[in-house]
Image: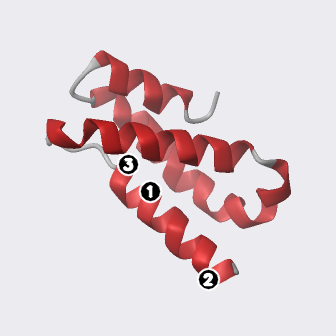
């Protein structure tokens, strides 16, 4: 349902925000991989559109990540 999708993508975006907690790197990478798949899935186009701006901001801010690997995953979010 649209409500479940909204709750899930909002949670994924919240978990993907850049912070200094390096213990959450694995969680962030998994969230970014899922978000990337959702953004690229053509059937979800109109449902995902409202979250592209926040995802792009998260992606750009991700270049300040704790490790190079994490920065790469933020860059891959839209590639």
The residue pinned by badge 3 equals 16
Q: Look at 46% across and 38% down and name the residue there.
A: 59
The residue pinned by badge 2 equals 3
The label on residue 13 is: 1
* Tag 1 near tag 3, CB within 8 Å: yes
Task: Give the number of callouts.
Answer: 3
Q: Above or below — where is 15 with respect to 58?
A: below
Q: Above or below — where is 59 with respect to 4?
A: above
Q: Secondary structure under badge 2?
A: helix
Q: Look at 27% across and 30% down and name the residue there.
A: 65
Q: Look at 49% across and 27% down and name the residue there.
A: 75
Picture quarter with the N terminus:
bottom right
* Coordinates of residue 30 in the picture (x, y in percent): 44, 41
Q: Look at 78% across and 59% down and name the residue there.
A: 44
Measured in 3D between alpha carbons, the distance from the residue under mark 3 to the one under mark 2, in whole angstroms, is 20 Å
* Coordinates of residue 10 in the picture (x, y in percent): 48, 66
* Residue at the top extreme, as displayed: 68
């Amino acid at each position: 349902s649209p409500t479940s999708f909204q709750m899930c993508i909002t949670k994924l975006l919240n978990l993907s925000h850049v912070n200094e907690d390096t213990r959450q790197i694995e969680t962030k990478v998994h969230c970014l991989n899922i978000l990337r798949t959702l953004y690229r899935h053509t059937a979800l186009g109109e449902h995902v559109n409202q979250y592209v701006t926040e995802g792009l901001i998260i992606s750009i801010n991700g270049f300040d990540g704790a490790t190079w690997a994490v920065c790469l995953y933020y860059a891959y979010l839209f590639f």
